[in-house]
Image (cartoon, grey):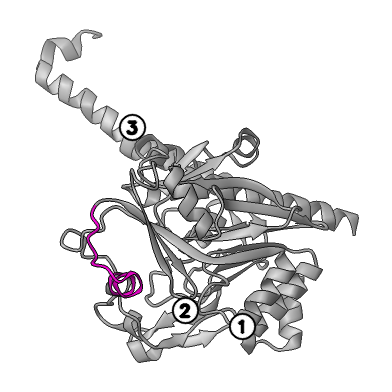
Amino acid sequence: MANFPGKYLPIEFRIFFRGFLVVAFIFVVIPLMSMLIWYLLPAASMGVVVIDKTVPTPNYQEHQSIHWLLNHFKFTKNEGSIYDASKDYFGFFPGKRIEDYQINDLSGQSEIQTQKTLDESQLVYFSDTYGVYENDLKEKPVQTHSKKIYGGMDKDDIAFLEKAYKKEIDIISEFNTIASPTKKEVRKDFENLAGIKWTGWIARYFDELDTMLNNDLPPWLVSGYKRQHQQAWDFSGPAMVFLHENGQIEILKEEIEIKKVVPEIVSSLKSQQTYGVPEIVKYPYWIDIIFVSRDYEVVSYYDLAPTEDGIKKLGEMGLPRYFPAVVVKKNGQGKFYYFCGDFADNPVSGSSYDFYGIEKLWRLFLHSEDYSQRNSFFWNFYFPLMESILKDTYQRNEIRKGEN
């Protein structure tokens, strides 16, 4: 009987059947087990307020990853339901038609509603306040300046932030919270509250500056540089582009002012152990450059590896050799985090959160230094960072509840 397969079944069929079993195990059994484990894990309620004013289309990319992580780690709303990226935030709400958008932000809350929101919240996350512009709502958005429809941090946001800070609620804020189009007086209030000073500079890595080879270069960037520097745009290859709030544009070219192929986020050994992040991860997207007060801990920092010429040019721009990437400080029983990048902007699927251990699978294929895949940053850096922050926030608030 034991020799039945070998005696009666062709070797080709046996090879095929073994392969079929392996494929079925990988693509059917493992996912089902992963989903089952996720459903068996206990859920816990944690009130999270998300503010996102940059939602031109219903993909909710500027905050989708926040809701995905909350659902993946089984943090529910206070009444027990899961977080919905299309509803559970304050800011701009796009409609099916361009003209059907709605605005539901903190300015629409009464004092009683605001107090209720604060009383039910353990975390406030300002993911993006840049806003929505007329060109964003066109069928084919174009990268030219257009009229603002909505955006910028305002006095109601600051008032809410101050109350959350006073209640020692955990706060996360990131680029773009206080850069343009936020008014300077509002930005100053934020800086005074947070102990952060924006340098006025934002920057981004471009892998190709030749306009014939890169159609994604914003036309205003090219024309602005030519006008300011009174010279032709004769760049090619990779570079870091720096933009100041006063309109100044500077370019640090690879192999001339910078050595790195792409900016790196570097984390200390302590940060790696505390937050589960890798030592180095590539980050080629928008960043803002800030100074922080001494009570901040620098979790991670940006390293462009500037040459001597690059260090000199950065100095002329009033910028240091290294830039903060993630900083945190204690605020009584709470914590205040600032992410100096567009970290929450990640292309994640809103329906894939119910698989336990899914991050391990993705990390097998997406290395932390592979910046060619946009979601590599999410799985290798943002996921472990937020996992640590969310679980720490929940645990500290459970202790606070026990003390009261």
Near mark 3 (Cα within 10 A), the count class, few <14, some 14-19 or many ≥20, is few
Left or right, residue 380 beside residue 82: left
Residue 313 rendering spot, x and y as whole percentages: 46, 54
**Residue drawn where x is 56% and y is 70% of the image:** 177
Judged from the image, the secondary structure of the residue bearing numbered disc 1 is loop
Residue 142 rendering spot, x and y as whole percentages: 27, 77
Is residue 121 visible in the rendered structure shown here? no
**Residue drawn where x is 63% and y is 39% of the image:** 271
Residue annotated with mark 3: 25
- What residue span does the magenta drawing correspond to? 222-236
Tell me which label, 2 or 3, sits earlier in the chain.
3
Query: Looking at the picture, does residue 98 appear above or below residue 212?
Result: below
**Residue drawn where x is 61% and y is 80% of the image:** 184
**Cα distance in 3D space between marks 3 and 1:** 53 Å
Residue 232 rendering spot, x and y as whole percentages: 23, 67
Judged from the image, the secondary structure of the residue bearing numbered disc 2 is loop
Q: Nearer the viewer, residue 300 or 38?
A: 300
Query: Looking at the picture, does residue 354 appear above or below residue 197?
Result: above
Q: Nearer the viewer, residue 296 or 35?
A: 296
Say if mark 3 contacts mark 1, CB within 8 Å.
no
Q: Is residue 227 magenta?
A: yes
Which amino acid is tagged 1? Asp
Q: Is residue 234 magenta?
A: yes
Find residue 154 and name its label. 1
Find residue 131 and name its label. 2
